[in-house]
Structures are given as C-alpha cells and as structure tokens.
Amino acid sequence: MNRQQLIALCEAAGAKPVHAEKLLAYIFRRGIHDPDKMPDIPGELRGFLKKHSQPLSIEVVAEQQAKDGTRKLLLTMPDGKNIETVLIPGTGRLTQCISTQVGCAIGCKFCLTATAGLTRNLIAAEMVAQVQTAQELSENKVRNLVLMGMGEPLHNFDEVAQFIRIAADPLGMAFSPRRITLSTAGLVPGIYRMIEEKLPCSLAVSLNATTDEARSRIMPINRRYPIAKLLQAIRDYIAAHGRKRVLIEYVLLAGVNDTVEDAERLCGMLRDIDTTVNLLPLNVSPGSQFKTPTDASVTRFRSILSDAGFVAVVRKSRGQDISAACGQLKAEQAA
Ligand code: SF4
C-alpha cells in the first residue's frame, strides 16, 4: 500500500493518519512487517493489521557473485515462480536492477528472458520485497533502482507505478526520484501515462537501431510503435518535465546495428533530444544468434556520437563471468 492507501486503512480501523506515517516507516524504511514488533502502533490497529494482512515470503534460492562484485540473486515468489535481481556495486553504494514481470511478452531477439514468454506480472509488494531482500544481504546501501530486469515495466503499469510511488515516498523507502530509472523497450502509450500520472522517476528508452526495418527485426514492438512515434513520445516527455534528460540505451550487436552509418543516423535522430546515450556491447547469452562487437567498432561508434556533441558512455557489461544479463541465472537453474 502507498501512503494514501495506508491513511485510508488507518481511518477504516479507527486510527489516526499519523499512524499511517509510522506504518510507512516501519514497513518500507525499516523492513519490519510483523505488527507485534511495532510498539508505538495502537493495539487495536495492530490487531486489525494482523487480521487483514498476510506476510509475503520470498526466498533466495541461488546466488552468484562476479569478480567485479556484481551479485545476482534468484528469488522464488510465494507461488513458486522465479525471478532475478542484480546488485551492482559503486563506491559505497549499490545499484539494484529490479524485475517487474515473471518472463516478458515483448520478444526482443537479443534477450534470454524473451524466450520463455510472459508468465505473469509481479505485484508492487514483490518489487518492494526484491529491494528489502537484497538490502538485508548487503552491507552497502541500495541507492539507485533501475527497472531493467526481467519484464517490460510499462506492460505492468499499475503495479510498477505503485512500486515507484512507494519507493519514492520520503517517509517510506525514500529513494530520490532521480535515482529511480524506468527502462522501456518503447511502449509509447505507457510513456504518455508516465507523463499524465507524473511518475516520480527517470525514463530510459532501449532504442537499439536506427531504421524501422532493423529495429523491427530485433525488437518486434517496433512494428506497433515505430521509431518516429517513439522519438515523439520522448520529446513530449522531456517537454512535460521541463528539460528532464532521457537516457537512450543502445545495445551494440556486431554487424547488426554498430556500423558507421548507424552511428551517423543516430546522431541525426537524436539531434533535438536532450539525452545521454548509453552504449552497451551485447552480453552474449548461451544460444544467442548475435555477437558482441569488437572494441574497435564500439570505440568508433562512441567517437562519432561524441564528435557530434552527444554525451555517449560505453557501459561495460558488469558481472560478465556470472552472465549477469537478465534471465540467465533462471535459465541455468532450470537446465
Ligand atoms: S529486453 Fe526487456 S523488454 Fe525486451 S524481451 Fe527482454 S525483458 Fe522484455
């Protein structure tokens, strides 16, 4: 429940709104879920909570740690379904990659999660539980959340929006909205809903190609929402937020989208968009039809963007020795 829902719940139980604020701090900031461990909550409200709530138990069933400190956790949800979350270390802080669905319906051709299709949406509580479980296992604080794990966040809009509101509530998990990034494969109506509902987070868009023909080949979603519509949605998002930067992600696939022509076209496409471009050389998964580009072609691609005045950053794959791309630990466990 978010703050407004907890206030309504407290009213229904005959308690004051201030108790909703205390519940927010107990549940989301301190990770205390047992009403008996909330001494300053009135007894009647504790009784009400015990009657009307149920604990959500998720279990860590596998864990891998890479040489660079990246940790990948395989979690089992209450119904036995597995999802992954990844913890990426920075200096004194962690970035956590959150899953929003069990599987994914979007079908990007370079993605292992896509191969199994969509099983179900996660609920907001299961996203909160990913953060709290990871935090319990880590000495450093989780500071950044990226909704980039299994699933397409905008395909599960309501639960993702609920999670983001809880995560950004200063009385609850208290993540700065600047430190929550929602990454989409390009569900255009979802971007407009983000604008309408003023979702407190940043937007990243996985673009990955510079022609509709190439993008439709690797990301079938492009047939529904082609590049021109997607770029317009990004411009509208930036305009609605008053110059809020959008992150463009571009997974480089050798010989598919990493040519000089692609880099030049990308510069043209993004010329009127306030953006940072993250270049991600493909983290190859077993059985992939694609290959990682050479260092030389990655450098060439980045230089073309930089020379044209863009902020372009090459993101080396973290946790390569544990195949940290989403879906890989789940696939290994199932094998
Ligand atoms: S890359 Fe993301 S949106 Fe595309 S299939 Fe994989 S999980 Fe889904």
Image (tube, rainbow, N blue to C red):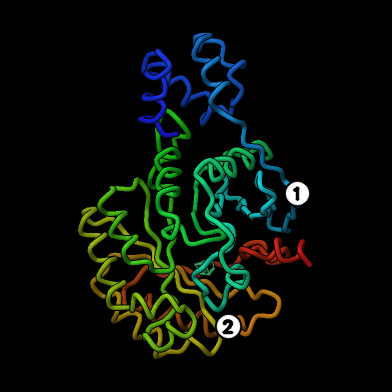
Q: In the structure shown, which secondary structural element does the residue marked by tag 2 occupy?
A: loop
Q: Is residue 65 left or right of residue 213?
A: right
- Measuring 56% from the left and 21% from the top, which residue is drawn there? 51
Instruction: Looking at this view, name the residue that lies furthest to the right.
Output: 335
Q: Nearer the viewer, mark 1 or mark 2?
A: 1
Vertical placement of 276 versus 79: above or below? Answer: below
Residue with the mark numbered 1 = 61
Amino acid type, callout 2: Pro
Secondary structure state at the residue bearing disc 1: strand
Badge 2, how many Cα within 10 Å: few under 14, some, many 20+?
many
Disc 1 marks a residue whose amino acid type is Val
Image label count: 2
In the rendered image, residue 12, in percent from the top left (x then y), is placed at 39, 19
Residue 317 vs residue 76, the one in the foreground = 76
> x%, y% of residue 132?
59, 38
Residue at 37% across / 18% down in the picture?
11
| Residue 127 in sight in this render | yes
Query: Residue visible at 43% across and 16% down?
Result: 13
The quadrant of the picture occupied by the N terminus is top left
Q: For the residue with label 1, is its CB less than 8 Å from the closest atom of ligand 1?
A: no
Which mark is drawn over residue 11? none
Instruction: Please tell me whether residue 298 is drawn above or below residue 6 in the rendered image.
Output: below
Indicate the position of residue 178 as horizontal and vertical percent values: 38, 47
Badge 2 is on which residue?
Answer: 293
Q: Nearer the viewer, residue 208 or 115?
A: 115
> Who comes first in sequence, dot 1 or dot 2?
1
